[in-house]
């Protein structure tokens, strides 16, 4: 019997939309490349509850609601709503997410005839996907992306997370450290494949440094640090700002660029601006706001060192994107960071929550003469295509095992 082709429902609540264009771009990057090899449709559930319009009077950016359907680069993307009360009943989010998506999948089963649900994040998305997989009698794959670490400290969500992993046919982990974590919780070791994220080297590459600096009105000879990501506490911009006064004693013209804006996790820009003012470093910190991914090569090419003093990561795509532009990376020893920055010639790994160590690593990185070509070559070795070929092969195996 001839093998079926994998036909994927990509199931993920963190996905770009017209109202949140920078949410989950790294997920879209991976899945749209998979979509070049097999058909995909995206279902991205959106939290909703009856009184959220009232909340927007006090929090204008709260839960932006995309249209129920978008076509993104030829891919159908659906945004069904699911019942979710802010701050309450979080242990039921996975069930309500599945319930809210059921009609969308029922219609797709007739028009698209999917044979795999490919979920991202074990909870609530993965848990919801396994319920849908049971209801529609299709196998489910789940990709672990790092949120599983903090969620495993919450008993109710840990229970559902592990139920999802037990029910999934195959599990992908973006980092080996993340695989080890869920295995230590009780997940099945031999069903988990480690497949890191990749980088699009056509999109991320160095451009002329002087022109890039002119673009952002940066002094030609100043030392420049850069961070990219959603403006949330987890990303640790405040930890970098905290050590700027000491760094300015050594590098008086130092500039710290922050690229990013509000995300589904929140927006702490006001706090960061207050912090820069209180430390008297406002003239040395530039908030560029969010930028489309195809424009990130410009601020990256203008900088000397990429820094992310993050509290939790799975496998941070942004490290490879910075490296593809020739930048060394200074980051914290959490999640899969050490798996990405795995050599002293690529950057520095520091202990989390140690400002002195962070300051010394940044000083060392700013003073060091890095081999940028070597850093770029490493990024090229981690281009997307290798990862995507492996994913497609595994998806094909899942379908053949089901037949």
Image (spheres, grey):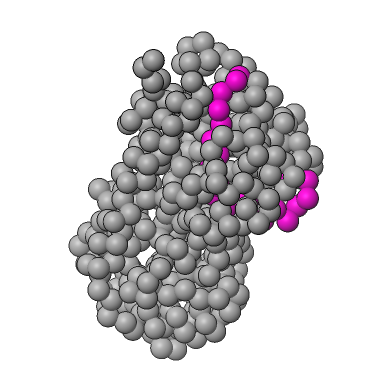
Relative image position of residue 23 (x, y in whole percent): 50, 44
Relative image position of residue 101 (x, y in whole percent): 62, 24
Residue lying at 40% horizontally and 20% vertically, measured from the top left? 4
Residue 302 lies, with reference to residue 91, above or below; the image says below
- Residue furthest front as drawn: 1
Residue lying at 58% horizontally and 73% vertically, measured from the top left? 352
194 with respect to 129 (left or right): left
Which of the 4 image quadrants contains residue 139? top right
Residue 263 is at least partly visible in this image: no
**Foreground: 338 or 69?**
338
- Residue furthest bottom as drawn: 249
Region of the chain picked out in magenta, as a range: 136-157
Relative image position of residue 224 (x, y in whole percent): 36, 72
In the rendered image, residue 224 lying in the magenta stretch gets the answer no
Which of the 4 image quadrants contains residue 208? bottom left
Residue 324 is at least partly visible in this image: yes
In the rendered image, residue 147 lying in the magenta stretch gets the answer yes
**Foreground: 306 or 9?**
9
Residue 255 lies, with reference to residue 131, above or below; the image says below
Which of the 4 image quadrants contains residue 363? bottom left
Residue lying at 51% horizontally and 10% vertically, measured from the top left? 110
Residue 75 lies, with reference to residue 178, above or below; the image says above
**Foreground: 36 or 310?**
36
Position of the N terminus, as image quadrant, is top left
Relative image position of residue 117 (x, y in whole percent): 53, 29
**Foreground: 313 or 166?**
166
233 with respect to 151 (left or right): left
| Total marks placed | 0
């Amino acid at each position: 019997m001839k093998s079926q082709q994998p036909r994927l429902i990509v199931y993920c609540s963190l996905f770009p939309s017209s109202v949140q264009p920078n949410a989950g771009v790294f997920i879209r990057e991976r899945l749209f490349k998979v979509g070049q090899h097999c058909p995909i449709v995206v279902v991205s559930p959106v939290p909703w509850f009856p009184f959220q319009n009232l909340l927007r009077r006090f929090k204008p950016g709260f839960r932006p609601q995309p249209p129920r359907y978008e076509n993104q680069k030829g891919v159908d993307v659906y945004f069904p709503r699911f019942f979710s009360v802010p701050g309450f009943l979080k242990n039921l989010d996975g069930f309500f997410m599945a319930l809210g998506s059921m009609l969308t999948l029922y219609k797709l089963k007739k028009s698209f005839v999917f044979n795999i649900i490919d979920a991202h994040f074990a909870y609530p998305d993965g848990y919801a996907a396994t319920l849908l997989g049971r209801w529609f009698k299709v196998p489910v794959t789940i990709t672990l992306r790092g949120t599983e670490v903090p969620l495993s400290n919450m008993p109710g969500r840990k229970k559902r997370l592990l139920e999802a992993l037990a029910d999934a046919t195959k599990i992908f982990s973006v980092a080996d450290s993340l695989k080890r974590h869920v295995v230590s919780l009780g997940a099945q070791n031999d069903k988990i494949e480690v497949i890191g994220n990749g980088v699009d080297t056509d999109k991320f590459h160095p451009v002329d440094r002087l022109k890039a600096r002119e673009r952002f009105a940066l002094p030609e000879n100043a030392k420049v640090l850069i961070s990219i990501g959603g403006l949330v506490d987890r990303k640790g911009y405040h930890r970098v700002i905290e050590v700027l006064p000491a760094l300015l004693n050594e590098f008086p013209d130092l500039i710290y660029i922050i690229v990013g804006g509000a995300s589904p996790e929140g927006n702490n820009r006001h706090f960061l601006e207050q912090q820069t003012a209180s430390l008297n470093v406002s003239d040395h910190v530039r908030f560029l706001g969010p930028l489309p991914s195809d424009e990130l090569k410009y601020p990256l090419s203008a900088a000397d060192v990429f820094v992310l003093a993050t509290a939790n990561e799975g496998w941070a795509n942004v490290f490879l994107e910075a490296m593809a532009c020739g930048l060394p990376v200074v980051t914290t020893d959490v999640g899969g960071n050490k798996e990405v920055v795995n050599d002293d010639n690529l950057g520095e790994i520091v202990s989390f929550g140690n400002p002195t160590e962070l300051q010394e690593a940044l000083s060392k990185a700013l003073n060091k003469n890095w081999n940028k070509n070597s850093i770029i070559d490493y990024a090229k070795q981690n281009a997307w295509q290798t990862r995507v070929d492996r994913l497609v092969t595994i998806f094909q195996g899942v379908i053949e095992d089901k037949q």
